Amino acid sequence: MEDPFEMMRLEGRSTGVGRVRKLLTITDWMLAQKILRFSDITPVDWDDFKVRVKWGAKALTGSREVTDAEGITAEAILEYFRLFQHLYDFHQAEFTDGGRLLPDGLLFKPFSAKEDAISLARALGEETGKTKTIPTHVALYALNAAIEWVVEHGPEILSLREQAAHEWLLVEREHTDRVPRPSSSEVNRRLANAIGDMLESPEKIPLYGSTISRTSLAAQIGISPPPLYSNSVCVEMIDMLQDIMDNPEGSVSPGKRDRLLVLIKHWSSVPAQSSAGKIYPARIARDVAERIRLPFTGSKRTKGEPWPVKVLGSSIHERRSLEAVTNHLWTASFLVIAAFMADRLEEVLETEVDCLILDRPEGPYFVNKAWKDTHTESGIESARPCPEVVVKAAEILRKLGAQAREETGSAKLFMCDHRHGCSVADETTARKRLDAFCQWIGIPADETGELWSIAPHQLRRFFVQAFTWQYELGVDLLALKQHLRQADLETTIRYATSALLGEMLNEEEKALTVFIMEKAAFDGLELSGGYGEHLLRAFSRLRVRVGPPEKLAEAIRKHQEKHNILLKPNPWGYCVWSLSRARFAECARREGITAPAGPVAAHRSSRTCGKCLNLLTHSGFAPFWRTAQARFEAMLAVPGIPPVCSRAAQEGITISRRFAHAGSRQKEGTPHELETESETAKEPHQD
């Protein structure tokens, strides 16, 4: 049927489920209004619905007062409007025989045009983008733990899991081949058959003197003797057989003989016990745990670590199991990919197993589909650069879900392989596992003292927050919009401005500046770069002039506050910025700006900053420079590379080599030295 208003559009499985729920909410609203049929809804009822819908389902059904309810988004309201349009369109549509597609439907047209529904939904709905911004320390704590699990603990967990799977097959085969101990029913069956034969051939009765030898009888039917002494049925049958032997003339009462025949007939008809060993998973798990030498403590220790792994499967008595740490490794990999790629939850879960491109000289790329831009089932596939930790996380997920993909025939990266079977991960699974992982690592409390429950979409917002830190509140928002794959720049701006305010950024930069300076002054942090060496020499002189460490720390803080020196983070180091240092900015010089208010984002790159006298870097950034050097060398090795690219790669190699090793120092001259209080009084603008 025709859909001129595009009201039947479904954006995915979750949209379909949500629309069904909203239809049930509409029926609840009808019952609350004592409306029994869709055709009984009047325009007055429709107007009442439009007034109440902005407050959500509980306000519609009367379970909560409108004044106490929280508003819902415009998109949620539009879903309700789509359903009312369905009720009208389906009622108007007819089959070829003249019957209506929906016999009971809406009798009046709810909207005259698609734009009317959209504009009304926007007017009634709350502003979108209300996902709470995760506190910085909470996000960094969770992400740091996830990276440690992926990089440090992932290989050992996977190895332990492979050993357990291999040993499980061996132990299971041993349990199957093992001859089982006869059950009570099997003992009764064998004894009944044997006594039946003995009644027909008394010479087969094993005797010890004039008494039946129970030990010989047990050996004859292939069991151990104890059941013939303790099993009540066995004892009764043997005692009656003994009476028959002791009274051959037939003086045994007919009732006792009949009772024996009844027992023989009953137990002889019982099915024989299988000769294959019965599998007891708990026993197999115990044997496997012994073979792989649990508990396992791992070789690397970190906060929130998985060790020790004590048992194979989780239970109410023991949570430190291989099953639990495997699930947490899955969650850590999910968290890494969601945080660094900043995709929506449904886009992350729909990622295919062949999501990596590793043969490009500039580095790895992550490939998956964006769903929201087109609202179509096929989606738009795009490739974006990704860090090495994302590659490691994807490889872990590929191994964890290999068996599940084989059994289900799915090509999804995020698969669940657990004790109940295999399945494709859904949103509920991701949210529950994320909560469990946060509890395991001991997620810190927020400023109110409450433990923070991380929602997957908050990881997308945290990427914006981190991006904002690097590029000063959205200077390069087009690049951010491209990475987030958002349809319009307004949404990106809302994300960036709500993620971090300018005041907060300034306070974070001040705290970071003092922290790095104190680490260099007191803890021997190796600094390099245009500003790094000169800062270390200045600290050496200050120690002589100022004296004790506490006075040196106070001098550092006063100097930072007086000149407003700020360290602005980059992936390759820090940009040291103040009014007097602006003239040394290489990025501003390339733009032709003589008095810049801040670093020029358009020219901020590792190559430009590597030549700048305002660069401060240390051994913690050495991995970036080594990776940069390797990438430039890979670019230079590409056959037929253009001359301009070759020169850029050679320059990048030269710069990267300066900082590629911990403790390396830049040999270029440095600007004026850091002054003490007396020196700054003479030259107040120098820092």
Image (tube, grey):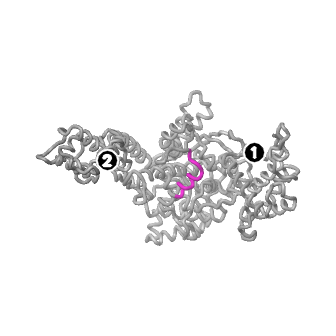
Q: Secondary structure at mark 1?
A: loop
Residue 420 at x, y percent in the picture: 49, 48
Q: Secondary structure at mark 2?
A: helix
Observer-nearest of 233 and 598: 233
Residue beneath the point at 21% across and 37% down: 201
Write down the quadrant of residue 462 in the picture: bottom right
Cα gap from disc 1 to disc 2, whole angstroms:
71 Å
Q: Residues within 10 Å of mark 1 (few under 14, many from 20)?
A: few
Q: Which mark is residue 78?
A: none
Q: Earlier in the sequence, mark 1 or mark 2?
A: 1
Amino acid on which the number 1 mark rests in the picture: Arg
Observer-nearest of 231 and 282: 231
Judge whether residue 141 is colored magenta.
no
Name the residue beneath numbered marker 1: 9
Q: Is residue 508 left or right of residue 54?
A: left
Q: Residues within 10 Å of mark 2 (few under 14, many from 20)?
A: some
- Evaluate if marks 1 and 2 touch, with contact meaning CB atoms under 8 Å apart: no
Judge whether residue 428 is colored magenta.
yes
Name the quarter where the N terminus is drawn.
top right
Residue beneath the point at 79% across and 58% down: 36
Residue 185 at x, y percent in the picture: 33, 47
Residue 170 appears anywhere in the view: no
Name the residue beneath numbered marker 2: 263
Residue 499 at x, y percent in the picture: 65, 59
Q: Is residue 431 left or right of residue 206?
A: right
Span highlighted in magenta in the image: 424-435
